[in-house]
Amino acid sequence: MTLLDRLFENVTKHSRAIIAVLLVMTVLVGAGAPMIEQSSSLDQFQSDSPAAKKLNYINSNFTTGNENTTTVQVILKGDNVLSKEAMVNSLQFQQRLRDNQTINETLAEGTASTGVANVIAISAIQQQKVAELKASGAKLQQRGQQLNRTAAGLSDALNQTRALQGKYDQLNASHQSGDVDNESYRQQSAKIEAQLSQVRATATANLSAEQSATFNKSAQQARGLQAKLDGLNASYQSGDIDESNYKQQAGEIQSQFGKVYKLGTQGVLADEYTKLGEQSEKLQQKRSALENGSMPTLAEQLDQLQSMNQSRIDSLTKAVLSDDGGGSGGMASQALAFMPTSYDTGSTEANATMLVIFQKQEGQSSMEGQASDMLVSTQQGMKTIADEEFDHEALVFGSGIISEEINQSMADSLAIVGPLALLFVILTLIIAYRDVLDILLGILGIAFVLVWTFGFMGWAGITFNQMFIAVPVLLIGLAIDYAIHVFMRHREERETNPDEDVRGSMRVALVSVGAALTWVTATTVIGFLSNLVSPLPPIQDFGIVSSVGIVAALIIFGGLIPALKLELDGFLESRGFNRKKRAFGTGGGPLGSILTVGATAARKAPLVVIVLTLLVSAAGGYGATKVDTSFSQEDFLASSPPHWTKQLPEPFKPGNYSAKQNLDFVNDNFVREDSQAQLLVEGDITRDDALEQVKRAEEQAAKKDVTLTLSNGEPQVQSPLSVMKQVAAQNETFNQTFTAADTDGDGVPDKNLETVYDGLFAAAPDDAAGVIYREDGNYEALRVTISLKGGASSSAVTTQMREVADNFDGLTATATGQSIVFEIVQDDLLNTVIESLVITMVAVFAFLMLIYRITEGSATLGAVTLLPVVFSVAWILGTMYLLGMPFNVLTGMITSLTVGLGVAYSIHLSERYNVELERQGSVWEAMHVSLTGTGGALLGSAATTVGGFGVLAFAILPALQQFGIITGLTIIYAFIASVLVLPSLLVVWTRYFGPGARGSIELKSEGAPTPSED
């Protein structure tokens, strides 16, 4: 007796100790179950790829003013969403969001929401402010001109004063020399004084008393200096002073004249000039505030729209939503991004528009599928407000709503699938067992297996995600397999040896099927652990948890449940109850005939069976090369549940699902805020041709099929260059810097780029930080963001964006983004399929050959046992191709799962055939007993497993539906291969490699023709 046989024999010898120990272990391991955490984030499927690293680099180092935010897209529908009423309604909806304290706390600082209504209102306010600034500027200019004319008049008055003073000085000289008598002098001097008085009166006519006094003072000083200058000239002409002294004194007088003129003009108007300067400075500040994008508040926007008539709104709408954005620059130039891609540019009518709301994430992932409870509740609140405000004519689409629907679909799937799986298993067990106690023991065993499995997850810190919904179903099916094999073998033994007691029959049953159960467990665990080669953590975790659950099934149904059964059966029989039951499939009749079809075919034409199997498998293998790979958000978004589910009572009734439908609508009609490719440009980004290369990349990206084109025919691309042009359109200072750096006039700076970057950060720091990364004053990287068509395949996006990135010269450009990271996940999924299949095949092949060499003396029997599983793999992959079913995170494990699950059927039949071959001494008798005995157990286990997985077709999650269907087919194929194909393989093995080849057994029984005689 082998060590394994003695181990199973001890279960019957020490049944009560086994029960006590395993119950205590169940309590201890199960204590970890409450510690399980749940996640639906697609972020967990990321591998450590260069593209993923660069995406994390972008998320960490580039900001857009709304740092660490997530977006909510609200699609507004109506007869005309560009009417005044609709736009006002849009702004009122935004105000209601702010009025809601819970929602408002999550809204981003600064610009919390934006849409066409905001653009129109802000443009109107900006135009009004521009008009006001122009009017104020013109008024100040007019006042300045007026002051300059007044100053010029005062200067002329001083000139006239000096001229009259010159005449006065000549009159005085003539009077002193006696050329003019006293009477003439008095008359002429009086006339000059009158003229001087008239000049002063004219000059000060519009001046204040203080200003007049200042001017009169300057006029008096001017007369004195002019008299001094005239005296100096007379002295120079008479030769009293030389030329050098004359020039020195004349220069000093002229210098004093400058001060006098300044006092008589600017001094007089000093207060006026100061006031004008202050007004000019205030006007410049207002102009700078407008240039730097100081946005009006939502209340101001609402007031502005309400004050405008429909005609004015239509006029502005035409300008803003025209092909060139109406020349308004800045935010208005991006307005078309809020309109459907089918929108007729410049039209004042549209049936849908988009509103974008920014929410703080508080450390949440930037990837899809997972959101905090706060985001979930607030986005649900937004949806409620939108339904009220727009009479259910709005679609609300955000990470919180998506996350909630994914989580809800997981819960709804469990609520539907769990009871259905259990119900199916119970019905199957009723048919197979026809005994209440055995049915209850089977259900109890399943419960304990699940407790062990989820307890392990809690202790190991493994997060429950979408994939793990399949684990309970998987373990229910596999665990009940173990129960059926043990119970049916026990019943067979009691029927064959009626004098044997319960304990003795159970000992024989466990010893006879224990090895097969162990090998089945080992090969199944090998199949699931092969997923450890996957670079995707959730698939690794799924393989580990499933393996632990399968080992738990062996322990529970190989130890605890048999021990409980023999104790209970012994107790009941001691009280006079008959516990002998017939094994399923051993009583002859139609079922027995069906199960022996494989034996009949093996007797008559085994080679024909094998050749046909090879041909079908070859066709399946060809289809396997055509199976696609998929990893996208849509894989986890549920469609509307079938109508019949609405009739289910609570808590089984599923919720409503709209995210997938809304996602499809957004993909078809709008810019997806989360559907973008990004180019990360690193290296010497201050080199002269850096922005020229960015420009070429923009042009190349615009020509790609995956790039989204707005209704004006232009691609939606944000780059350092596009941001610079927007800022230059609003900020004159940066416009000068931008223009000065463009030496060839092509609109792209090609020198002094560091100065241009500095100017951009000075003019618009938030916008600059979204496209340029600098650290400690050094410019490190540029970012180009390209909006993608919503339905673009990740494969096409990856290929085309990498083509754009490869054209940079002297700079390192990396194409990344969610679609590209998802494509890498798809590649990893395909690699997982191939690598896990190869590893599983090689490991199981080596394991079976070694085990059968040790236990049966024939390694070739291990290879024969595995061949039906190889055929099953080809059949299931061919079926996936025919059904158009791709590899995803669940179906991607189907190859290793097929081997792990399918080999169980072959092992049980091979093991039973080998045992019966020794007992019966005839190939055909051994085959008949094996197929009617073990075949019946295989049919029962296959039925429970298929039923268990088949109910996944009723799951809400699409990926689970596909997984349930394909896994159910896998079990069917494995069962068919084991009962129809394996018998022929075993006959050939027996003849050429087994006992027949060694001459130790006859290949024919009495009255039964050999295959060669047919």
Image (cartoon, rainbow, N blue to C red):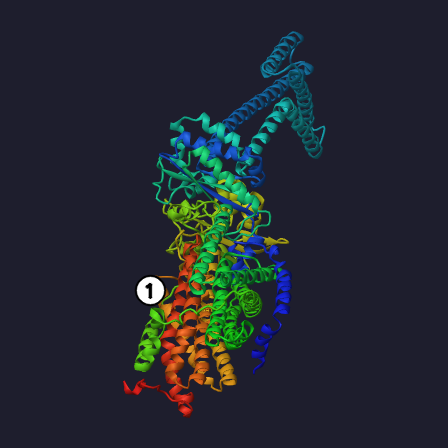
**Total numbered labels placed on residues in the image:** 1
Q: Give the residue displayed 41% in from the left and 68% down from the top.
A: 939
Q: Quadrant of the N terminus?
A: bottom right
Q: Is residue 695 above or below residue 479?
A: above
Q: Is 449 placed left or right of 347 in the picture?
A: right
Measuring from the top left, give residue 924's x and y in whole percent.
37, 82
Measuring from the top left, give residue 725's x and y in whole percent.
48, 45
Q: Nearer the viewer, residue 579 or 618?
A: 579
Q: Is residue 346 above or below residue 433?
A: above
Using the rendered image of the protein, determine whether residue 612 is visible from the camera's viewpoint: yes
Q: Is residue 13 above or below residue 645?
A: below
Using the rendered image of the protein, determine whether residue 801 is visible from the camera's viewpoint: no
Pick out the residue farthest to the front. Answer: 576
Measuring from the top left, give residue 970's x and y in whole percent.
40, 67
Q: Mark 1 highlights which residue?
A: 882
Pick out the residue farthest to the bottom. Answer: 999
Secondary element at image label 1? helix
Q: Quadrant of the C terminus?
A: bottom left
Q: Give the residue displayed 38% in from the left and 56% down from the top.
A: 704
Q: Looking at numbered disc 1 in the image, what kind of residue is underneath it?
A: Leu
Pick out the residue farthest to the left. Answer: 1014
Q: Nearer the viewer, residue 317 or 721?
A: 317
Q: Is 212 placed left or right of 378 in the picture?
A: right
Measuring from the top left, give residue 901's x and y in whole percent.
46, 69
Q: Nearer the viewer, residue 858 or 790?
A: 858
Q: Nearer the viewer, residue 621 or 508?
A: 508
Name which quarter of the figure residue 167 lies in.
top right
Number of residues whose C-alpha sits closer than 10 Å to that of mark 1, classed few (under 14), some (14–19) or many (20 or more): some
